Amino acid sequence: MAEVTRKRELGRGERVLPGLWRLRLPLPWPGVPHCNAWAVAAGDGIVLFDCGLHEPGSLEQLERAMAMCNLRLEQVRLLVCTHAHSDHYGQAATVVQRAGCELWMHPNHEHMTRAARDPDAAFARRIEIARQSGVPAEPLRRYAEQRRERGFGIAELIEPDRPLLPGVTVDTDLGPWSVIETPGHAPSHVCLFGAERRLLISGDHLLGRVSLYFDYGWTPDPTGEFLRSLDRVEALDARLCLPGHGRTFTDVRAHIVANRELVHERLARVLDAISDEPLTAFEVVPRVYGDALSEQNAQWWLAETLSYLTHLAAEGRAQRLPGEADRWRRAPGQH
Ligand SMILES: [Zn+2]
Ligand SMILES: [Zn+2]
């Protein structure tokens, strides 16, 4: 008889190239079953790029994935995080402690570290953004409860030993990797580019499946930042992409084009939605995505929609009408 209970996913490791391994780590999130960390040989050890979410048993999953590649945590000479989201940075403190290595990460990590340092304030701020976006009181209370239960997925707050900024290189046996700032998905996001082999460690900036997420509320225009980051990465002409989730892929430019097209398509839909009458972000969501906000998609879609509205306003194509809840309308004379 078929097994009915779903088995818990396990950490898995596989060699991608000589000296480069993919460590696939399970996530407890619906629709996002795992994330990737990448190990690259460096002298007598390895550089680890990203490290997975912190939750009960997560360190064993990382060690299990590494063991499948004959690697051990103690061999990590340096931990590099593409950005400060919990699935990429969550176990950083544990890895640094166990391996005695440094952590390098972009300095704009407040979107995570400030929130994790003061969860109540972060939570209140999120609720205020939702209220200001026109989310009614009852769903607001339900989203709030759900968020509070989830926690942050961070083992311990840890600051980077070195700011991962342009000009910094990460040396490995596969050559040096340079830092490309790619804000948009998160303010702290960077990609690492190994020019010798045209390899790109893309974090969540580029994934095999086009999937947009913008960390709203920390920078003036996440959508604009994301579009500029796509241009920056396109100019690298990478041959193989090592993404933060899913399999490696080679048609990097096609993925960049697909991301850009989806952003422009959604911007057009948002602008269309606010053409006839001023709407709150909450009211715009079902007109762009075809579905109303639910506990599952609330944070994601609301942040994305607000990012589009803010971008349109920054470009002079939309106007924000401040009020009890902000409304947005197409700027006069815009078609
Ligand atoms: Zn992320
Ligand atoms: Zn991620």
Image (cartoon, rainbow, N blue to C red):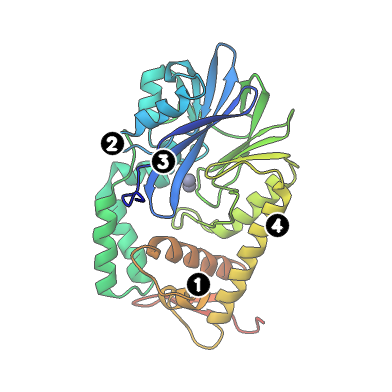
Contact (Cβ within 8 Å) of mark 2 with mark 3: no
* SS class, disc 4: helix
- Residue 164 spot, x, y in % from top left: 55, 32
The Cα atoms of the two marked residues, 3 and 4, are separated by 29 Å
The quarter of the displayed image where residue 308 is located: bottom right
Amino acid of disc 4: Val
Left or right: residue 329 compared with residue 229: left
User: Is residue 234 left or right of 269 when viewed as pictured?
Assistant: right
Q: Position of residue 96 (x, y in %)?
A: 40, 23
| Residue at image location 32% in from the left, 70% down from the top | 131
**Circle 3 SS class:** strand
- Whether 92 is drawn above or below 289: the answer is above
How many numbered marks, from 0 up? 4
Q: Is residue 316 visible?
A: no
**Which numbered disc flags the more N-terminal residue, 4 or 2?**
2
Q: CA distance from mark 2 to mark 1?
A: 34 Å
- As drawn, the residue found furthest toward the front would be 1
Percent x, y of residue 62: 41, 30
Q: Earlier in the sequence, mark 2 or mark 1?
A: 2
Residue highlighted by disc 3: 26
The residue singled out by tag 4 in the image is 257
Inter-mark Cα distance, 4 to 1: 21 Å
Question: Which numbered disc, 2 or 1, marks the residue closer to the eye?
Answer: 2
- Indicate which disc, 4 or 1, sits on the residue closer to the N terminus: 4
Q: Could you tell me the amino acid type at mark 3?
A: Pro
Q: Earlier in the sequence, mark 1 or mark 3?
A: 3
Please tell me which residue is depicted at 43% across the width and 16% down the height of the picture: 74
Amino acid carrying mark 1 in the image:
Tyr
Label 4 – label 2 distance at C-alpha = 39 Å
